[in-house]
Image (cartoon, rainbow, N blue to C red):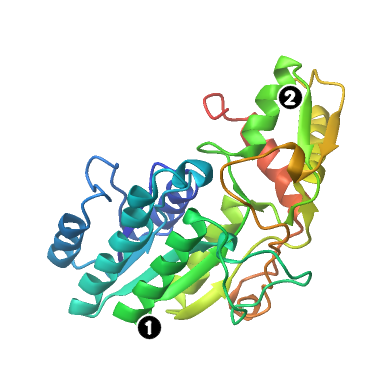
């Protein structure tokens, strides 16, 4: 198949492009300069011209706090551009997968969110991603929406790498302990995306690793596993704090665990436990000299 992967310089898009190429697909994975998501009209024209079998949109404005003061840019990238992509794909009968986020939910409930639970985003980032989902499905009813959460990977910037850098420098770590979610490795998300594309699955799905943790629990696991693997960990401890002790411009959902039962029959294997995937990611990161 001929596939467009947007966001190919990011942590998810880069890993997905490599995987799909390795599977023998013809993959176009442009740099941001080659496909400017702040120009939805031009992006749409490129898609109409190239007529890819699948457009997989991994690109997003993900600066959650900055989005509060840059709402216009966030909505162009997260809503307007996906909408124009979907319109173009619908015009020639192609397929599209839109990657979305747990941030479309408020975090008010205490059981995993299903695909049919009512979204209630708390900030600009979540609203822009939710409206992106909605416009994609309006323009292309058989599109695929894949929501995931707490993403980290060997490539790009993420929480795991931040914790490793701070720990190596010996700086103290104070991490929020009253927000719960599921850390999810990009390699596992790529597995889910490949399964959905190969089976031509449409509709909305949730995918994360199995289990749940707080950011504090996640950080503690990172340092414990990293020290065992051989990363320099020069900080004594991770200190748990409340969200109120670390104010940010954007509110975060206190609970954003996603229910993955709908997608599981389509996967080649069940979602792995998040701690197992973290350990595997750290082992891979340790072999990549330029990734940290």
Instruction: Give above or below for 265 relative to 171.
Output: below
Q: Is residue 23 left or right of residue 188?
A: left
Q: Is residue 105 left or right of residue 84?
A: right
According to the picture, the residue beneath numbered tag 2 turns out to be: 231
Name the residue: 17% across, 59% down: 41
The answer to which of 80 and 72 lies nearer the viewer is 72
The answer to which of 276 and 111 lies nearer the viewer is 111
According to the picture, the residue beneath numbered tag 1 turns out to be: 142
The quadrant holding residue 249 is top right
User: Could you classify mark 2 by the number of other residues whose Cα lies within 10 Å: few (under 14), some (14-19), or many (20 or more)?
Assistant: some
- Counting from the top left corner in percent of width and height, residue 254 is at 72, 57
- Counting from the top left corner in percent of width and height, residue 207 is at 61, 66
- Counting from the top left corner in percent of width and height, residue 99 is at 46, 62
Q: Which secondary structure lies at badge 1?
A: loop
Instruction: Give above or below for 188 relative to 94.
Output: above
Q: Are marks 1 and 2 in contact (CB under 8 Å)?
A: no
């Amino acid at each position: 198949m001929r596939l467009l992967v947007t966001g190919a310089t990011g942590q998810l898009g880069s890993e997905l492009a490599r995987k799909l190429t390795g599977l023998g697909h013809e993959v176009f994975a442009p740099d941001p300069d080659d496909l400017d998501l702040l120009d939805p009209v031009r992006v749409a024209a490129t898609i109409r011209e190239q007529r890819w079998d699948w457009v997989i949109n991994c690109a997003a404005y993900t600066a959650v706090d900055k989005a509060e003061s840059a709402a216009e840019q966030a909505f162009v990238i997260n809503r307007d551009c996906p909408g124009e992509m979907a319109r173009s794909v619908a015009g020639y009968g192609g397929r599209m997968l839109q990657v979305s986020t747990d941030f479309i939910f408020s975090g008010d409930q205490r059981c995993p969110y299903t695909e049919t639970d009512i979204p209630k985003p708390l900030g600009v980032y979540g609203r822009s991603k939710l409206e992106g989902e909605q416009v994609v499905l309006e323009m292309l009813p058989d599109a695929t929406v894949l929501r995931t959460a707490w993403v980290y990977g060997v490539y790009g910037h993420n929480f795991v790498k931040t914790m490793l850098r701070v720990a190596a420098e010996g700086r103290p770590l104070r991490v929020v302990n009253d927000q719960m979610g599921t850390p999810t490795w990009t390699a596992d998300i790529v597995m889910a995306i490949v399964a959905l594309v190969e089976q031509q699955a449409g509709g909305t799905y949730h995918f994360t690793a199995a289990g749940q943790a707080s950011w504090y629990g996640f950080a503690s696991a990172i340092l414990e596993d990293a020290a065992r693997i051989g990363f320099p960990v020069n900080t004594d401890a991770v200190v748990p704090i409340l969200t109120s002790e670390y104010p940010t411009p954007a509110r975060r959902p206190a609970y954003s665990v996603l229910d993955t039962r709908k997608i599981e029959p389509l996967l080649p294997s069940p979602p792995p436990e998040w701690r197992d995937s973290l350990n595997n990611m750290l082992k891979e990161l340790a072999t990549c000299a330029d990734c940290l």
